[in-house]
């Protein structure tokens, strides 16, 4: 199977970038509503519809939800790419549709999507509301779970550019987790099934992004939805779509999420009883906060008349302005950057720092500055 070609053939070209709202996806949902697969199951805090999309006639039931966090849109794009595959009439599509029944909530948090926030309109993190169920979106997610009675749950998220694969200096482009079902982080039959699927997806992705797959922390928190569903005995897999080099709009990462989805369902449809793949799973390096978007090394600064060499880092803040996401770089860390990497790194070789106000960088100021007379940086990047 040529996964690269499969992605290109099924990519949903009407959506791209980071800012994905309900208005963006409703035309696609209506387009693929070919046999009354689409329904509205309720409303968000601000009254936006929350859609459910069911497709397939197979015995194995797969529950997928995306944009539980409103500003995490990469997996939503990949989910629609996958739904396009199910509609393309191919042998693979027929195989999946006969083996599985898919139940998708492609945008659980439409208010957060519109506001470009992690939380919902009540400023509640839905992924910490799985026990109290204080929010309408959380209640709907749980109600569908209880009604659908899935065999597997796919919990689809994004993660920030700060995450790398352990201390390798490579970004965690895709990360997975088979959530724990108890404080002891033991492995039962349910969790083992999730672990085996992750091991398979990792083995496929290593062919495309070697060394860029991470494993998320498995500390148990019953308030998280994945931990809750695992606790209730349903194999649950957390997907984290992360950074690929230069891909701040996550158009490359969406491809790898699509590949992971396809490879997981291919494996599940084979009806092969897996050997225990726990060792493979545990050999996936853990996610670690080791990245800044920019690191500047060996910078000379003048502080109170004293010159010295230092390092500093800048990080993008994703700011919604007039309906568009702006990546604005701000100084985030100064001096001690041991163990950290930059997605972009610049060796100043002792060039003197200067900006419009100071002769040294300050936390939270915009990353607009000069290094010596030769290099001028605007929004973190060298101005050419």
Image (cartoon, grey):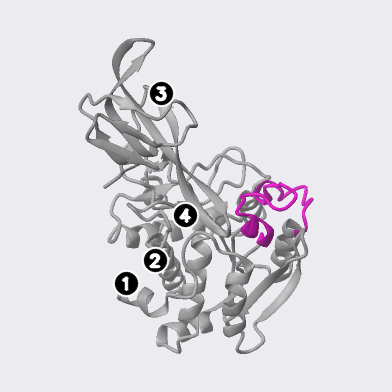
Label 1 neighbourhood size at 10 Å, few (<14), some (14-19), many (20+)?
few
Label 4 neighbourhood size at 10 Å, few (<14), some (14-19), many (20+)?
many
Q: Which residue is mark 3?
A: 358
Marks 1 & 3, CB-CB < 8 Å contact: no
Between label 2 and label 4, give the one nearer the viewer.
2
The one nearer the camera, 198 or 333, is 333
Give residue 255's mark. Answer: 2
Q: Quadrant of residue 233?
A: bottom right
Q: Residue at x 39, y 61 (%)?
A: 201
Left or right of 243 on screen, residue 68: right
The one nearer the camera, 226 or 41, is 41
Q: Which residue is mark 4?
A: 195
The numbered mark, 2 or 4, whose residue comes first in the sequence reads 4
Give residue 4's mark. Answer: 1
The residue range painted magenta reads: 109-136
**Residue 156 visible in the shown view:** no
Label 2 neighbourhood size at 10 Å, few (<14), some (14-19), many (20+)?
many
Label 3 neighbourhood size at 10 Å, few (<14), some (14-19), many (20+)?
few
């Amino acid at each position: 199977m040529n996964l690269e070609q499969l992605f290109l053939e099924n990519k949903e070209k009407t959506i791209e970038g980071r800012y994905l709202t309900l208005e963006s996806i409703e035309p696609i949902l209506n387009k693929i509503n070919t046999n009354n697969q689409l329904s509205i199951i309720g409303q968000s805090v601000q009254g936006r519809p929350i859609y459910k999309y069911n497709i397939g006639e197979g015995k194995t039931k797969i529950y997928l939800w995306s944009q539980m966090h409103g500003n995490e849109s990469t997996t939503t794009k990949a989910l629609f790419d996958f739904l396009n595959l199910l509609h393309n009439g191919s042998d693979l599509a027929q195989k999946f549709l006969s083996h599985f029944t898919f139940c998708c909530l492609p945008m659980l948090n439409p208010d957060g999507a519109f506001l470009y926030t992690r939380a919902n309109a009540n400023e509640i993190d839905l992924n910490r509301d799985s026990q109290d169920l204080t929010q309408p979106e959380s209640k709907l997610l749980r109600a569908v779970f209880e009604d659908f009675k899935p065999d597997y749950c796919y919990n689809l998220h994004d993660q920030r550019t700060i995450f790398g694969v352990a201390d390798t200096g490579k970004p965690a482009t895709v990360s997975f987790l088979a959530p724990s079902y108890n404080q002891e982080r033991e492995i039962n039959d349910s969790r083992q099934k999730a672990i085996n699927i992750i091991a398979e997806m990792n083995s496929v992705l290593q062919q495309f992004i070697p060394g860029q797959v991470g494993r998320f922390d498995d500390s148990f928190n019953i308030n998280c939805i994945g931990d809750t569903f695992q606790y209730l005995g349903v194999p649950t897999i957390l997907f984290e779509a992360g950074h690929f080099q230069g891909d701040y709009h996550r158009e490359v990462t969406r491809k790898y999420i699509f590949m992971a989805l396809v490879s997981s369902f291919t494996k599940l449809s084979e009806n092969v009883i897996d050997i225990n793949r726990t060792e493979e799973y545990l050999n996936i390096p853990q996610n670690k906060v080791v990245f800044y978007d920019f690191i500047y090394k060996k910078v000379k600064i003048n502080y109170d008349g004293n010159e010295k060499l230092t390092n500093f880092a800048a990080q993008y803040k994703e700011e919604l302005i007039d309906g568009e996401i702006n990546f604005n770089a701000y100084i985030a860390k100064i001096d001690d950057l041991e163990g950290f990497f930059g997605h972009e790194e610049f060796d100043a070789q002792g060039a003197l720092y200067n900006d419009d106000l100071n002769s040294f960088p300050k936390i939270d100021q915009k990353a607009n500055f000069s290094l010596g007379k030769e290099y001028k940086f605007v929004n973190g990047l060298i101005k050419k």
